[in-house]
Image: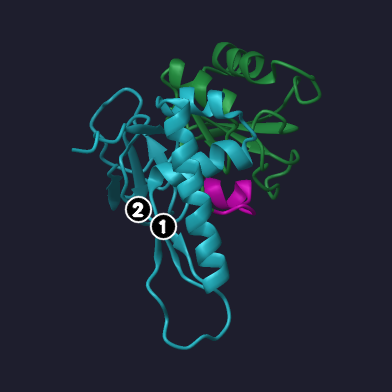
Amino acid sequence: MRIVIPISDKSKTSTVSKKFARSPHFAVVDKTDRTVEVIENPYADLNLGVGKKLLNWLTKEYKVDTLLAFELGLKVQQLANESKMQLIIINEKKQTLKQLLSFMKIE
Amino acid sequence: MPRPRQISKVQIPPRVRGFIPVGYYKDQSEPVQLNIEEYEAIRLLDYEGLSQVEASHLMQISRPTLTRIYERARKKIATALTEAHQIVIEGGNAIFNGSWFECERCNCKFNNPNELPVQSCPVCESFNLHHLED
């Protein structure tokens, strides 16, 4: 299982971004290998069609199959549903990556 | 005999089960029950800013039905705000888009797109899960 988490900056203390597609960075968590990779969002400043390009990139380059977010835009939800990706909605707006990784018993 | 109500499709379950008024007031009144489809109508139209046609397609109901649901929802919320009622989000005639679960430990909600047996939370691996019924 590879989970992508939108985060506000590159550090482990960064918080989960409020919106998924416009997040400046992502953490890609591999639950099987127990690894974390922080990547930049190349589409963060794109005007239109961010969701589709982003999901294609995340699935092709990083083999992501699960999206974790506080909130997902409608377009991303629809595209994720079409691709049979799992959606995880967290309830804490200011949750940090460190706390999430601790929950996942990764760090 | 009245026509049966159309079943609405809801994209993501509501984050919480309701809201309570803040401040002192004596003799708490009966809570206002906001149906799941009424919550979804408010979310799609007022929060996401969709048109009624777009929202009705997503909810898989007719546009006039959506208008009626939306008007009911606004009336209920206005009543709750003005008369200081609790709002309870439950019931109604809706199905979720796929099956959804809530983890009792980390409180995340997650779906099961491949319909595989769900045993533990994908975040904290807790077995204490609650299947969110429509």
Question: Which quarter of the rendered picture does the N terminus of chain B lie within?
Answer: top left
Q: Is residue B40 in view from this perspective? A: no
Image location (x, y in percent) of residue B52? 56, 29
Helix, strand or loop under label 1: loop
Residue carrying label 2: B90
Of residue B35 and residue A60, the one placed in the foreground of this image is B35
Residue B6 drawn above or below residue A94: above
**In the orientation shown, which residue stands out farthest toward the left?**
B1
Q: Which residues are magenta?
A: A92-103
Image point (37%, 30%), residue name: B97
Residue B83 inside the magenta-drawn segment: no
Quarter assignment of residue B110: top left
The amino acid at mark 2 is Glu
Which colour represents chain A?
A: green
In this rendering, the count of numbered labels is: 2
Residue A102 inside the magenta-drawn segment: yes
Which colour represents chain B?
A: cyan
Q: How is the image coloured?
A: by chain
Image location (x, y in percent) of residue A32? 42, 30
As drawn, is B39 to the left or to the right of A40? left
Residue carrying label 1: B17
The amino acid at mark 1 is Arg
Image point (61%, 28%), residue name: B51
